[in-house]
Structures are given as structure tokens and as C-alpha cells.
Image (cartoon, rainbow, N blue to C red):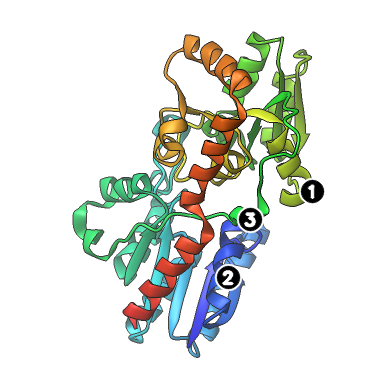
Amino acid sequence: MKILFLGPIKSSFAKNDIEILQKDFELSIINSSTGRGIKGIFNLMKCIVLSTIYLIKSDVVFSWFADYTSLVPVFLAKLFKKKSIVIAGGFDVGYQPQLNYGAIMKPIRWFCVRNTFKYADKIIPVSNYAAEALMRLTGKDYWAKTEVIYNGIKSEKFSLPENENRNIFLTVSQAHSDIEFKLKGSDTFIKIAAENPNYEFKLVGLRGEALNEAKKMAMNIKNIEVIEGPLNLYTELIPLYQKSFAYIQLSIEESFGVAVVEAMKCGCVPIISNNSALPEISGKFAKIINTPSDITSALQFSVEANITLRTAISNYSETFDIKYREEKLLNLINNLL
């Protein structure tokens, strides 16, 4: 069986699904990250043309996110009685009007997103939160064809450090724009560093406008380092996880939180905002920040966390091992045909 795969192919979650699907199926892969401006329009048209050509020889369309690039192939799949699967869990189900964030804030984009969901045979949110967000934006119309399958990590690639020599607090963000900078809580992280000068903080992964904003905001704060992305997971990020007392994720909205799970596998205490999927993913080990005073106790707690607690956190993270996603994805596809 042949699958047309559309997704941001440089992202770890897309790479994981490609690896899963290639075990049992023949894949035609198209990068759905089109970019912006004139180049973005050209890449979008190229993506639509290629997906139309590949669709002829494919049995299933598998799209990471509903967006401009997904509508035509999913609609054509319905027209030609082929099957289609759409992963929901990002801008497509996001809604933060104060930041002008979410596909629903942009009429043409929302038309593409809403109709992608309409014509898809299966919608797979990456968390219960993402499923609930989908229903809030679209109504209950798609509930019957929706199945939550969590994102996953390759647990065997992550581990507790051989020597407990933790000395930093860490957050990771792939934010590029000013909106994403605020959405991911990077500004709050910098403020926390400024208010806690006795600890060292690292903010890593930012690019573009977000990176410039972070450097400007952190300019006179001596205990924080801003590191440009992207970073290599195995040679750069994992060593940082293993040096961290806690992983801090204070996003305004987060459909899953892969970095949270990766960090927990390395024994980091998860310090999170009480927003979106973060409490769902972090479970009973989360130190949730509701008030400014919460952060002081959370930082101190994570500094004092012993190896027994860190091992329990690491073991819990295996709830999201990639093998569970693989099993459920393959069952879903086989039952769909």
C-alpha cells in the first residue's frame, strides 16, 4: 500500500512518523513547510501540484496538520474514494486572540483548515487537549472520526546522567516570530531568570525575530544564556537536559510538549504553566505555576530533588514511548482500509 505523506519533514515528530510508516508502507514524502512571501507562495503551489500527482498512485493521504497544503490532497482523496488522515495539534487548533494566534484568526487559512477536517476520514489529535480544542473550534461534527494518539519519543535515546551534576534551569523553544516568543513563554522565562540571580538559566532554540527579542530582553541579565537554534538533539540538547535541575515550560498554549517529555526522561522536574496539554503530559510530577510565589518553591524543590524522584520521573515519561504511537497508528491505518 502507498501513502502520500505531507508534513514539516525536518521536525522530529514528522521524522518519527515517517520511520513508523516506512516499516509497512511505501511512502511519497512532501515537505509542507512552505515558508513566507513570494517563495512561500511558489512552494505552496509546488506542494499542491506534487501532492496531486502523487495522489494518483497513493491509497492514503497522511497529513501532519491541517493547513493550506492539506486541503487539495484531502479533498481529492475524498473525490477519488481514497482515504485520508490528518494530525491535529498546532496552529490548526490553536486559538489565542490576544496574540492573533491560530488558523481561525485568518479567514482563508481557516477555510483550508476547516475543510481539511471536514473531508478527512480520520483526525488524530496529539493530546486530549488538542481534541477538545478541535471540538471547541469546529463543534462536535468530527467527534466520531477523531482518535487521540499521543506524540512519542524514542525513550532509549534518552537517559539519566551517569553523574548527578545538575546546575541549570532550561527551556527549549523553536519560536521564530515575536508571537511565538510570547506564546511559548520565553519572555516569562527571562523574567524568572532576572528575579532569581542565584541560579543559571538557558533559553535555547530560538531563531529570527524571537531570537532578537530574547537577546534584547536578556541583555543585562547575567545569569541567563540565550542560545540560537536549531540544536542537534543528541549532541547538544540531551546533554543540556542532563545538566538541568528542571525543565521549565510556561507556554500560553501547547498541544503536546515533546521537549517536556524528553527532559523528564533525563530526570528533569517539569515546571509548567497550568495551560493546555502541559498538565496532561507532565502528570503527577508537574510543579504547576499559578502565582509568582509558586516559582520560588518550584525552583527550590527541583534543586533538592533526589535520584529516587528523578528516576520515577524518567520512568513515567515512558508513557509516551514511540512504540505506543506506532502500534496505534498502524492499527488505525489498517482498520481504515
Q: For this view, does 182 lie left or right of residue 162?
A: left
Q: Are marks 3 and 2 in contact (CB under 8 Å)?
A: no
Q: For this view, does 180 lie left or right of residue 167?
A: left
| Among the two numbered marks 1 and 2 on one chain, the one whose residue lies closer to the N terminus | 2
The x, y position of residue 73, in whole percent, is 45, 75
Spatial CA span between label 1 and label 2: 22 Å
Seen at 63% across and 53% down, the residue is 36
Circle 1 Cα neighbour tier, 10 Å, few/some/many (<14 / 14–19 / ≥20): few
The x, y position of residue 271, in whole percent, is 53, 27
Q: Tag count in the figure?
A: 3
Seen at 43% across and 49% down, the residue is 103
Most foreground residue, 117 or 205: 205
Mark 2 residue element: helix
| Among the two numbered marks 1 and 3 on one chain, the one whose residue lies closer to the N terminus | 3
The x, y position of residue 156, in whole percent, is 63, 55
Residue 183 appearing in the image: yes
Q: Are marks 1 and 2 in contact (CB under 8 Å)?
A: no
Q: To which residue does mark 3 refer?
A: 156
Specify the farthest residue to the front.
308
Mark 1 residue element: helix
Spatial CA span between label 1 and label 3: 15 Å
The x, y position of residue 25, in whole percent, is 52, 83
Q: To which residue does mark 2 refer?
A: 18
Q: To which residue does mark 1 refer?
A: 235
Q: Is residue 141 above or below residue 304?
A: below
Residue 269 appearing in the image: no
Q: Is residue 249 above or below residue 36?
A: above
